Every structure is written in structure tokens, then in C-alpha cells.
Image (cartoon, rainbow, N blue to C red):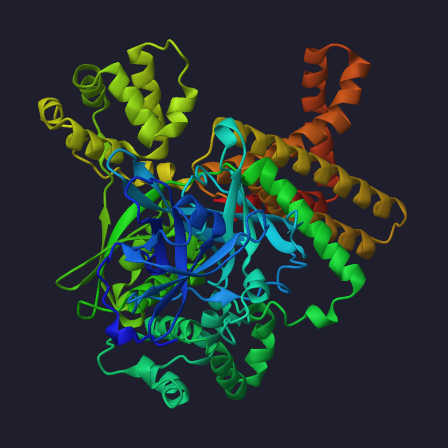
Amino acid sequence: MNWNLKNLDWEEPEKEFEELSVVHIQSTDPKKTDFGSGFIFFEDEEGAYVLTCAHVVRDVGGIDQVKVENRHATVIYHSENGYADDLAILKVEGLKNLPNLPLGNFRRELSNRKFLTKFRIHAYSEFDSRNRIYSLDNLQGYLGDKKRLKGQNQPSKVDSWILKIDQDHFLKPGNSGSPVIDTRSYNVLGIVTHLEGKGQNKGKVGIAVSIATLEEVWEEIPPGLLRKVYYLEPLSELLKTIFTTEDKLCNSFYPVFPEVFEPKLDIKILVRIEYLVIYCHRHNELDKLIDIIKNTSQKKYKKWICKIDPSYKKKLLSKKTIIKHYYESKICVLIRGLFIKSSQTENSRLEIECLGDYPESPEVTEARIRALLGHLRANGEKIDRGQVKLIVVKKGSVKIEIELPSEALDKLIELYEQDRSVLERELGISYLTEILKERFKIKNIQALLKQGFETEEILAICNDNFSPVAELINPGSSKVEIINSLIEYLRQKSQIQDFLSLARKRKPQAYEKFRPYYKVPRRPSGRARRRANSTFQTRARMVLAGVMGVGVSTLGYFALFQLTQLLSSSTSNDVILQIIGLVHGLGLIALGDITGQAVLIPTGGRRGNAVGRLAIFSYFAGLVIFFFWNFVMPQLLAVGNPFIFILSSLIGFLLVFVGSFLNDPRTLLSLLSTGTSLGLGSYLAYQRTR
């Protein structure tokens, strides 16, 4: 791969590093409007090689009419019509100095995966069909079942995966040929070929052909193009635990990777570690990096290698273990389908000013972002690279604007306010500034649509740019109903800004007439912000979480009570009885943690103060239900009169308690012990979920 980081001209700083490799494919015939996506995966002295779908080549007019980024492309391979692999390889002369997406050999790593494999997709879709404006979309999701596909006249079967698109994203026309990137190894594992589904679910499921198929269909494939898979985040964490100083890192890796330690690269140690990992990953030299780690610290290498290399323990897996992993994966898919599939998070924007000089290579910017996420994970925040979007890199100094979950932003601001010197010393961050979201004046937007656009024009906008709205509009709907449906969709999808940009181009006079459309944003108070960012749940999810927490708590109390009763009835030894009491107290504490975990399942793993309070309520509600059902209900049925029963029970309880305390003072100690266990259990339930 003839690619030098120093010569990379980053002309579009608003693109993600991986997005620089994604290209737009269209026809050389201006009358044809079909298009598709592709990505650069290899480069030689003459130009770049692009991988896309064979049906994209046919749709744009055939092998003689393919254009990639306004350059003529030569088709050097394409599968036959009706073949399941649906792959095409294009060569674009003169297209150089762009990152190549690494291809991973996932044939073995994903064959018996234990956990869900998360992916992200970068693909082009149509934004404005009239003016032929296209947008580069980012999608996320999880791999479904593996499929073996075969065309009618195809000699062999092809490996493929079902794609399950996450949250509010959809596969759209034009996404064919886009890369499916594994979020843990940052390697391409497949290529999008089809979208499936009907109605509102259209595009929520798709098909991706395994990238390993390329090795079977392309006879002239360069050696080593499909590389061994390593997970990069644990590799970075291992480097941080071994190489704690800049000198130690430099002494170990400078002789092998001198480019990483250039004097011009004024970056801090955590950023340099991420830069080293990215550099080795892009240049297919992770094996050298891991060998150096192995020679430096054999003990830590053995501890971490199973997390870094997914194939490390494959040889040791028995048939029974593989079957166990298979069913664990099925359970994960079931739980996600029931509870986590539609979870949503609120995002915020952040501007970071870093020490250094602009311009810097996109690899360094990517290293800064990954180092920042690693610092958040080290402080207990669960976040991955797919949850963060690069917005822009501003000139003058290195100012990076990113979008990330609001919870992560709050944690980062908290760390920044606690000790700014840590972020500056280890990450090279001089200051952080939150960019408050724009809020819109909906009444002015409604007036713009009512008076500035005809009904036919609004329907055309929906059909051309917001197709899900067009599918929901019933024939004969009034103009007001159409406007309300459009605005509701724009609010849910956070696309009001896109519509206003479109309206300003099409109706500039009407746009100016009904201004302003934006409200001046105000930062909410600390308490309101914590409440808003703590969790983003629907009422139904919170109710389901409460029901599950109460159920687990009640069953846990019942099982613990039966166990202690069984053990106590079989002995009269005071020492053993005290041990049983200790076991009972530890069980109450552990039950709090279990209740918290149960509450997190319906909320999709989202935490917050509201969820923490719900966990405490569920913990004690289970105790009350168990006590009432096991002790109160039988007595109540026997007495018949609830008022007399409650009064007599309170008096009897006080007399028994006072009498027991006078006869044996250890009764008070036992009650204090039980109360302490309940307090610790509720604390664990809150800490698990807050």
C-alpha cells in the first residue's frame, strides 16, 4: 500500500476518517439517475481499487458507463447477473492518497461468535433528487444469522450475513456497495448488497456478502489483502498499562516505527499510543506491534491476548463449548430484540481545543478521539467509537468539534472540572466547550409551510427528501395534516435543520418572511441537565423495568427465606446459627445488585438517577410484597376484619419486640444487622443503575 500519512491532503475535514475511503458511484450518462456506494480497499502506482456491487454497475449503465467521484472507472471484475456474491471491482486511475479500508478475514472469527457483533456502515443516499444532492449517512447495527446463498447458475455458495439496523436508521437506495465495518477491529467484514422489509420496517434489515468471498472470486487478489483480525481497544489498553512514559514507549517502538515519533507530531502519550495502533493497523503491521509487546512483558501479554486476538482460544474450544456459545448468542439476540432494539440516547456537541498545529493528518485527529474515549472508559463510562461523530476540524489551531452521548459529555466535563492538568498532560486538551443545541420556533416553521408552499410542493418535498412521511400520508389528507406529519417526523429524526436549508434554496423570499426559526439556546441548570441526560426512556420501559425489578426482588427474598429456614431448622448450634445469619445478610446485599441488573434489562442498559431510584423502590417493594404474602395474608384471612387485624398486629409486634429485647439483647443486634444489609443492598441497586 503506497500511502504516506504526511502527503495526505485532508480536503474535507468534516468527514470521519473511514468516510474518506467511501466513494460515490454514478453513470457517465447524465440522463441516468441511478447511483451507488463503494469504498477504496487497495492502491497501486496507477490508482485506487474500489469495491462495490455488481448490480450497481448494471444500474448505472454497464461496465462502460461507470464513474467514481467524477472519474471514469474501469471494471476489472464483476459477478454474473443472478450470482449471489454480487461483487464488482473497479480501478480508478489518478485517485490516490486516500485511506484504504482494511479487509478482515472474519471467516473463522465470526463462525462461532459468543456475543453480538456490532457494525457501522458509511453509505451514500439521495438527499434532494431534483438537484441530485447526495448525503453520506452513518448507520449502526448488529449482525444477525449467517446465510449461505447460491445463485441459479452459480457453482458454489457464498457466505453472507443478515444486517439488523439499530435505532432510527434505515438502509436506503444507494447504500448498495457500502462497507460493513466491525466496531472492535475496525476491519471491513462485508459489503451491503440488499435491503429488506416492508412499510415502516423497510430498510431495517439487509444482507451483506462476506468480504472473504473476494478471495474466491478475484484470481489476482494481492497477497495479504485479507488480514488477521485483532481487536484494537484492548490492544490500546494493554499498551497503556505497559508503556506508562513517553521515553519507554519511544525506546521500544522507535526502531521499528520511526514515523510515529516524528518531531513534528506534538502529541501526548495517550494520543501517541492510539496513533501507533492506527498506524500499525493501516499498514498491516499489528503482528510486529504485538511481538514487541510480547517480548516486553510476557505476563501481561498472556493476560490480554485472549481479548485482543479473537481466534486465540478457538483451538481449545470443545464441541460442547461451541454449542453453549451458540445458544448464548441466541439469547443475546432475543434479549436485544425484546428490550434494547429501540433504545435512544440524547446527543450533545463538544468543541475541544488541542495542543498542536493545524493542519494535522486525519489519523492524528482519529487518535485524539480514540484517546479521549479510552480516558472516559477508564473512568467508568461505557462508550465506543460508533457513538461519536466527528463534525469538523477548525483551522487556526487544532479545534475538533464532535457529537457524543450527553452522559459521556457530562462525565467529561466533570473530569475536566476536577483536574484539567490530567487532560492536558495525557491527552493534550487545553479546554472543552459545549456547543448548545439549536432550538426551533415550530410556529414559524408551520407558517412557512402553510403560506409559503402549496400542498403539491409539500408532497413533492416529502416524496423526494423525506420518503417515510410520504408513505404515512393518507390520500385525501388536508394540508394541515400533511404539515403536522412532516414536522413531527422532522422533530423525531432531528432533521429540521435539513428542511430549513432546503426551504431556503427553494423559497428564499418565503424563508426570509417568516424568520426567525431559531431560539437562543440556554444551558439548563445542573439538576435539570442531570435529569435530562441521566436516561432517555419511555414510560412503558420504566414500568416494565419496575415490574421486572419487583419480580426479581420478591423471588429473591422468597428463595433466601426458604434457604435460611431450611438451614436453621436442622441445627441448634449458636455458632452455626450466627453463620446462617451472616449468609442471610450477604444474600440481602447481593440481592440488591441482582435487582439493579434486572432493572437495566428493559432500559437497554441506560443508567441515570431516575433508574437508580426505581431500582431502590423495586428492591424494597419486593420485600414488602413477600412479607405481606407470607406473613400478613394468612393472618388477615383468619381474622377477617382488616382494622382489628392491623391494630392487634402492631400491638403484638411491639410487645414481642420489647419482650425479646429484655430476654435477649442480641435481638437488637440482629435487627441492626438486617437493617444494615438492607441498606447496603439498596445502595448496590442504586450504584448499579444510576
Is 436 displayed left or right of 79 in the figure? Answer: left
Q: Residue at x 58, y 74 (%)?
A: 305
Residue 458, picture quadrant:
top left
Would residue 60 be seen by someone viewing this image from the given angle?
yes
Residue 373 placement (x, y as % from top left)? 39, 60
Would residue 267 be seen by someone viewing this image from the given angle?
no
Residue 595, picture quadrant:
top right
Is 151 displayed left or right of 447 in the figure? Answer: right
638 or 599: nearer the viewer:
599
Which residue in the rendered view is the most extreme toward the right?
Answer: 570
Residue 591 placement (x, y as % from top left)? 65, 45
Q: Residue at x 52, y 76 (%)?
A: 223
Q: Residue at x 33, y 16 (%)?
A: 482
184 or 109: nearer the viewer:
109
Q: Count how many numbered circles sit on residues in the image.
A: 0
Residue 222 placement (x, y as % from top left)? 49, 74
- Whether residue 5 is situated above or below residue 81 in the rendered picture: below
Is 271 displayed left or right of 667 in the figure? Answer: left
Q: Residue at x 33, y 53 (%)?
A: 67
Is 101 displayed left or right of 158 in the figure? Answer: left
Which residue in the rendered view is the most extreme toward the front?
Answer: 64
Residue 110, picture quadrant:
bottom right
Residue 618 placement (x, y as % from top left)? 59, 34
Q: Which quadrant is the N terminus positioned in?
A: bottom left
